[in-house]
Amino acid sequence: MAYIIIVSLLIGIVIGFILPINIPSTYVSYLSVAILAALDSVFGGIRASLEEKFDNLIFITGFFGNAILAGGLAYIGDVLGVPIYLAAIFVFGSRLFVNFAYIRRYLIDKMRKR
Amino acid sequence: MKKSVYISVALVSIVLGIMLSTQFKIVKKSGVVTVQRAEELAAQLKELQSEKDALLKQINDLEAKINAYEDSASKNSVITQTLKNDVEKYKELAGLTDLQGPGVIVTINDSKQAVPPGQDPNLFLVHDEDLLRVVNELRAAGAEAISLNDQRLIATSEIRCVGPTVNVNSVRFSAPYVIKAIGDPDTLEAALKLKGGVVDTLATWGIEVNIKKSDNILIKKYDGVIKFRYAKPLVEGENK
């Protein structure tokens, strides 16, 4: 599992560098919020798979849904003059840490049992 | 685990990787000026400035040489003598010679008054428009040669705000501004001090204008190069 994630992540990074994808700098903030949401989904997926509650459909929809929702909300916030992206950063950021903490505990428990 | 799980995880990771690298590329490209780059530019600026100074010196040397040649040529015949006189006259008119004579020295400085709350602090600073008005008034009063902070004002000179400074002949100055003008000192002073005139208006904002009459003012020549790239003289009878 971990190998698949790392290898495909590297493949994605390489593809991203090779492909001439260009996003106007005004949209960079939306992309960064979307990235945060996506990262959160990935960590959530890792945690779920460690707890053996992994659901493929939830993982996929969560990944794309969260990313699109975060980017869209950030955009709407910019249009309305309400910094909604702060909410996205706060929520996804804190969840990222929570998920990471779970993963860390699970791995440490596993090591201790051996 | 099922095969589809691996595929979806791989897919998600690839998408995430693409997003990460795209973001990285954009952030890197969006041109944050690093300290290093700023230092580099500062060094470049310094170098070019010293180069400019050297070139100015070269211009002065060459001009001295031209003068020497003209002098020696004028000794030979009456024609070259008159030609030289003509050249001198036009140089004077064009602002290419140092001039001296009676006139006024006007010193203009930013207001030292405390800006009252709610007032625009910009009104208490000297702007290009204020300088232009003073210069305009001096010209109207018959000033024959004018310089601003020792930059001779010629036909192509500009007086323009660049941020908090003012550009004259592409040289940057900040307050105080010293305007020297050769002409009838009394007329020039009277023109500036007219009721409701420039000095009166500027005094409202507390901008300090100090006019000093003098019997002997030295106004330096224009030290740039005058060269027309687009304008050409019209030959008579060839009117298009």
Image (cartoon, rainbow, N blue to C red):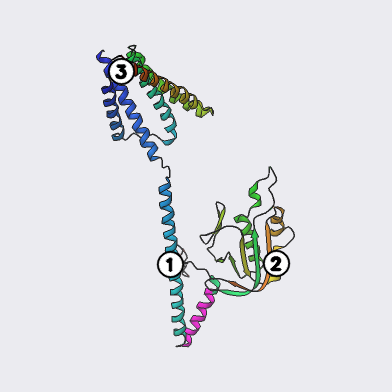
Secondary structure character of the magenta stretch overall: helix
Q: CA distance from mark 1 to mark 2?
A: 39 Å
Which label sits in the foreground, 1 or 2?
1
Q: Quadrant of residue A71?
A: top left
User: If the image is split into quadrants, where does the C terminus of chain A sit?
Assistant: top left
| Kind of element beneath mark 3 | helix
Residue at the spot x=49%, y=81% of the render? Answer: B84
User: If the image is split into quadrants, where does the N terminus of chain A sit?
Assistant: top left
Q: Which residues are magenta?
A: B77-91
Judge whether residue A60 can be spotted in this image. no
| Residue located beneath label 2 in the image | B189
Label 2 environment density (alpha carbons within 10 Å; few <14, some 14–19, many ≥20): many
Residue at the spot x=70%, y=67% of the render? Answer: B189
* Residue type beneath disc 1: Ala
| Residue located beneath label 3 in the image | A111
**Nearer to the camera, B198 or B43:** B43
With A43 as the anchor, is B80 left or right in this view?
right
Q: CA distance from mark 3 to mark 2?
A: 94 Å
**Nearer to the camera, B159 or A98:** A98
